[in-house]
Image: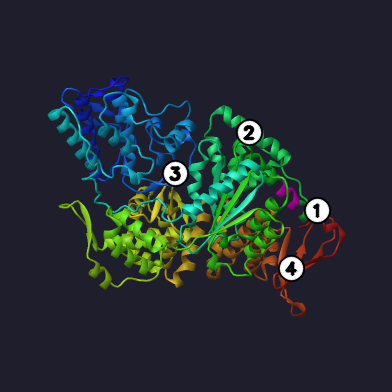
Amino acid sequence: MECQTGELLAGTLGKRWELTRLLRVAIGVSSSLGHLHGQGLLHNDVNPSNILVDRMSGNAWLAGSESESPIVRDRQAIEAPPMIAGTLPYMAPEQTGRMNRSIDSRSDLYSLGITLYEMLTGALPFSASDPIEWIHCHIARHPVPASERADGIPAVLSAIVSKLMSKNAEDRYQTAHGLEADLRKCLEEWETHGRIDLFTLGSHDTSARLLIPEKLHGRESEVSRLHAAFDRVLTSGRPELVLVSGYSGIGKSSVVNELRKALVPERGLFASGKFDQYKRDIPYATLCQALRSLVLRFLGKSDTELANWRTLLQEAVGGHGQLIVNLIPEAELIIGKQPPIADLARNDSETRFRGVLRRFLGALAQQEHPLVLFLDDLQWTDSATLVLLEYLLAEPGVQHLLLIGAYRDNEVDPTHPLVRTLKVFREAEIPMDEIVLAPLDLDDTDRLVADTLHCTPERAGPLAGLIYEKTAGNPFFAMQFLNSLAEESLILYTPEIAAWSWDLERIRAKSHTDNVVDLMIAKLNRLSVTTREVLKQLASLGSSAETTTLGMVHQVSVEEIHSALSEAVNIGLVSRRDNSYAFLHDRIQEAAYALVPEDERAPIHLRIGRLLTENTPVEKREENIFEIVNQLNRGVELITSPQERELVAGLNLIAGNRAKTATAYGSSLVYVSTGMVLLGEDCWQRHVRDGTQPSRMRIPDRRNGCRGRKIVDVGGPCGSSCRPSCRYAFACGSLYDFRSVGSCYRGWS
C-alpha cells in the first residue's frame, strides 16, 4: 500500500508495446497479483487504470484496492449491467452474473489477459457500444488471437493470452504464479535468442487450493434438450414445459442454469425462484421471487429502456395493477401508483387475478425476448401456484414462455398435487419434455476427479472408483466427499512436485458416512462454535436471510455476522450477497437445521417470530406478514399469554386476508384456522368490556359434536342499526361449509 511513482498503464496504451518491456511489466503485474491472491484477496477490477508501471525498470504495482474482497467462490447475482462491479471491457464472464459460475482468483487472471492483449496489439479484443453488448462479448464471442491481429507476436505469447481469456475458468491459468513462470520463460528466451520457441503452457500452474471444477460432467444431452426447447419457443411462440427430475444433489439446478448463457444479450429473459419446504403456505412466494428479480433488473436499465417497459406493463395490467403490486411491491416503481381493487365474489376474483397475471407475463414474454421461468423444488410447491400454472399453460394467451420445473421425483408420490397437475397438462396436450437426471457413471466421476486434481484420468481412476462406490454417482455428494478428504488431509498438495497426492489405503480405511447430510453435519461440526450458531439461525430463517435480520436474531452487529460466516463462505457452504446470505444447497441447510435439537426448534422459531414482530414497524408488518407469521406459527404451541395469543391471532388474520386477496384460498384458510385456535372462549366478552369491539369474533361451538365455529357479526355493511345474525362454519376434514342467516350480511367474506 506504499505510494508508488509509476505512471498509469492506461495512459500508455493505444499502440503496441515493445516485447521486452511488455514481458517485464506483465511479470511484475503477475507477481503482484500472485502476492494479493496469496493473502486471500481478490482484486475484482484488474484493468489498465488500476496498474502503475515503470517502463524503464518493468516494475508494476496494483492500484484500485477499494474493490478488493476475500477470495471466496461466490456466484454473482443476476443484476442489471450498470449495477455489476468491475470495468465492463475487462470483466470476466462469471462477473457478469450470466454464467452460473463462481468468481475466484481466476477472474482476475481473465481481466489481466484482456489487458495484455491490449498491450500486445494496441487494441481491445472486443468492441461494444452498451453494457449488454459487452456482456455478450465476454460470454459468447471468441477474440481473434493476438498473433493474427498483429504481425510479429510470438505464437506462444499469443497462446498465453488466449489461455488467460478462456471463457471457462477451468481452462485458464489456475494461479498467477503459474502465469508468471511462463512469462519469465518467454522473457529469458526472447532476451537470449530473440525468439520464443513453443513450450507446454502451465507446467508450474497447479493451485494449492482444492477447487472443484464447475463445468458439468455427463450432462451434455440434457443441456442440449433444454436449448432445443428454448429454440422451439423462440421459433413457434407456443409455450412449453420442461420438467427436470432426479434425486437431491443430482444436478438439476446446475443443468437448468446452463441455459442462462444462451439468453445473452437479447435472446430472452431468465427468471428463477426456489420453493422452500418451510414456507409452503406463503402464496405465490416462489413466483414472486422469480418475477421480482426481473423487476429489479428493469429498474437498473436506462431511462429510455425503463420507459418502454413501463408503457408495456401498464398497458398489460390496465386498471388492475394493484394485484401485481400486491404480489411484487417493487413493480409500483415501474407502473406507478395503482387504483384500489374492487371486491368481487370468489370465482370472479380468481378469474380477474389470473387474467391480470397472464397479461403481465405475456408482456414479459415477447418474440423479441422470450421468457424462461425456472421454478425449483416443485415437490414443495403450494397449491395456489400449481393452479395458476395450470391456467397459464392450459389456457391461450401467453406465448414465448418456456416454463422449467425441477423436482425430486423420489419425494413425489402418486397422490402429490404436482402429479395431478402434470396429468392435466398431458391431457391438455401441452408440449412437455421430461428430463430425468441419472447419477454420473464411473467415467464421468473419473473425469471430475481428474479435473479437480489436475492429473490424468488413469492416475485418478482408483480414487475415482472409491468415490463412485461411496457416493453412487451423486455429483453433490462426490464433490463434498472430495472436499472432506482434503479437509482431513487425506488428499494433499505437495509443493515439491507441484501436484496433488493421496494414500488410497488410508482413505479406504477411514470410516466415512454413506449419507450426504451426515457428511455435511460432520463438516459443519469442524467449524467454529460462533459460525455454527449463526448457521443454525440462518437455517431456522430459511434458505436465505438478510444480513440485518441475521444480526437482529443473533443479537450481534452486521460486521460480526460477516466475520462469523466468512469461514462458511470460504469452504462453500453459503454464498454472500451485498445484503444477504444463502445456503448453496438444500442439503447444507438441512444439515445446519439438523444441528438444532428437536426440542429447541419451536422455541427458536417463536423467539425469531417475536423479534421480527417487535422490530418491524406496525405500518410495515403487513408487508412482511408471511415471514413473521410463519415463524410464530412454528412455535405457537408455546404461547401461553392470552394477550400474545390474541396478537398472533390478529397477525394470522392479516396473513389470511393477504392470501385471500391473492386468491390463494387454501393458504388463507390455514392462517385463519390457526388464528381461530389461538382465541380463548372469553375473548369476545373481554374485548367488549374493554370497549374494543371487532366487527367479528369466532367463538367455539360444539353443538351436535361438530368441529365447527360460531361466527358472530356485530354491525354490518348496511349500517350499525342492522340486526346482528349468526353464521356457522362446519369443518369436516378439509371441507368447510359456510352457512349464514340474514340477507343484509352478504357483504361479509
Label 4 belongs to which residue?
A: 736
Q: Is residue 309 visible?
A: yes
Kindly identify the amino acid type of the residue bearing the numbered disc 1.
Answer: Pro
Kindly identify the amino acid type of the residue bearing the numbered disc 4.
Answer: Tyr
Query: In this view of the protein, which residue sits in the foreground, 746 or 206?
Result: 206
Write the start and end of the magenta stretch as one range.
Answer: 349-355
The majority secondary structure of the magenta stretch comes to helix
Q: Earlier in the sequence, mark 3 or mark 1?
A: 3
Mark 4, other Cα within 10 Å: few <14 / some 14–19 / many ≥20 = few
Query: In this view of the protein, which residue sits in the foreground, 77 or 247?
Result: 247
Please state, as top left, top right, bottom left or bottom right, where the N terminus lies in the image: top left
Residue 717: assigned label: 1
Q: Earlier in the sequence, mark 1 or mark 4?
A: 1
Measure the C-alpha gap from mark 1 to mark 4.
Answer: 24 Å
Kindly identify the amino acid type of the residue bearing the numbered disc 2.
Answer: Arg
Extreme residue in the right direction: 743
Measure the C-alpha gap from mark 3 to mark 2.
Answer: 28 Å
Label 3 belongs to which residue?
A: 99
Q: Does residue 143 sit above or below 317 in this rendering? A: above
* Horizontal arrangement in the rendering, residue 146 relative to residue 613 (left or right): left
Secondary-structure class at tag 4: strand
Measure the C-alpha gap from mark 2 to mark 1.
Answer: 38 Å
Q: Earlier in the sequence, mark 2 or mark 4?
A: 2
Mark nearer the viewer, 3 or 4: 3
Secondary-structure class at tag 3: loop
Residue 310: assigned label: 2
Q: Does residue 222 sit above or below 309 in this rendering? A: below
Check residue 206 for magenta coloring: no
- x, y percent for residue 690: 67, 61
Marks counted in the figure total: 4
Kindly identify the amino acid type of the residue bearing the numbered disc 3.
Answer: Met
